[in-house]
Image (spheres, rainbow, N blue to C red):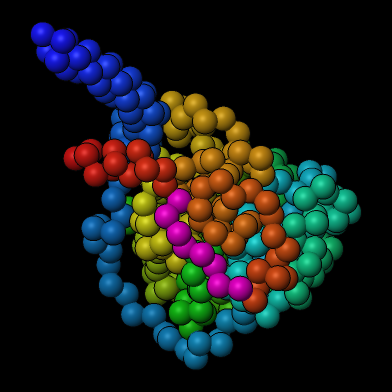
Amino acid sequence: MKLCSDIKAQLKIRHFYCLVALATILGMATYCVRYQTGSRYSVQSFYCWDRPVPQVAVEEHDVAFVPNIVHFVRLGDAPLSFIEVVSIRAAWLQQKPDSLMIHCDNCSATTGSEHWKHIKDIPRLMLSYVEKPETIFGIKISYIEHASDIVRIRVLRKYGGIYLDSDSYVVKSLDKYRRYETAIGWPPGQNIGNQIIVAHKRSKFLRLYYESYRKYRPDLWYYNGGELPTQEILGKNPHLVYRVPCDFGVHEHIVITLFEECNDDWRNFTAVHVFFRHRTHYLPADKFGPINFETVGRYEANFGKMARLVLTGSTKLGGSAVKNISLMSAENLDYSDGCGYLCRLMSLLTP
């Protein structure tokens, strides 16, 4: 009888521990499922890679046709942000440009930033003064973002090279696109994305793009940046650019890959527009909170891995100490698994 009582007691204890373990797993899995579900976001489903696009012959040149110069534009007085530091460091580490230029109308806002220390040691980093345009072809510019749209065209027409938005992330070298007079993200059935542009300074498209601002609409957010050039310039002359349907990640659905999933899908792209400032709009159910230097170490979705890679040198969870960029340039980046164990388990169990 005593033996039976002991066995029953042990079974009760084991049952209790099993229930506790199961409750813990379910609780953590509920947290991790935020990376696996598809009904949490306010962006239409769009799988870019399967969509057909017209085949248009575009002249191909030598790989060095477009200079290996990376350009960022900073207008206004805002200090360097977390996402800008991530994007600038990614551009340097992955593209390895001959020079990296930040075009600014108030360059002291950049050099005086708390986060300047994280990019100031980039070799061949240049700050170049640029005037912030107030008008274009006699029409008053309504938004600083519209002014930036104009400046990026002017910069590329002066130097040529690779333009990147402040939240555009280079995943791997863009050199294969430097063979074309202009390469730009243009997803199937959508407008061009001017967040990533590779172009020669004498690009015919850039000339027409700039001239199209004679029809500037200050009341429309992306009319001149994307809608007008797509319809009136490229709709009639698609051969003016090398169309990049998916590889520049300028389609909105990229936010699912970046902020909802934890896998290696982000590495399929050459570059991506992160839509960082619009994350809460596209993903209203994301309750993680701000992603910054203090929190990125525990952010499990793909963007966390991407940011940690260029800040710490590794995609591993937990890393947050920012390494000196000049030292990282001589090291191999560590693409370790940056997903938590339970989130990996959920990814296997979720159909």
At a point 52% along the width and 41% down the height, the residue shown is 299
Using the rendered view, name the quadrant where residue 295 is placed: top right
The prevailing secondary structure element of the residues shown in magenta is loop
Q: Nearer the viewer, residue 161 or 220?
A: 161
Q: Which residues are magenta?
A: 331-338
Residue 15 vs 134, above or below: the answer is above
Q: Is 116 above or below relative to 330?
A: above
Query: Which residue is depicted at the point 45% across and 66% down?
Result: 270
Residue 200 in view, yes or no? yes
Residue 41, x across and y down, in percent:
38, 32
* Image quadrant occupied by the N terminus: top left
Task: Using the image as rendered, state which of residue 214 and residue 73 is in the foreground.
Answer: 73
Residue 144 lies, with reference to residue 150, above or below; the image says above
Residue 52 in percent (x, y) is at 24, 61
Tell me the residue at 12%/13% (across/down). 4
| In-image side of 318 versus 349 (left or right) | right
Residue 332 within the segment the image draws in magenta: yes
Where 19 falls versus 221 (above or below)? above
Residue at the far bottom in the pictured view: 62
* Image quadrant in which the C terminus is located: top left
User: Is residue 221 shown left or right of residue 28?
Assistant: right
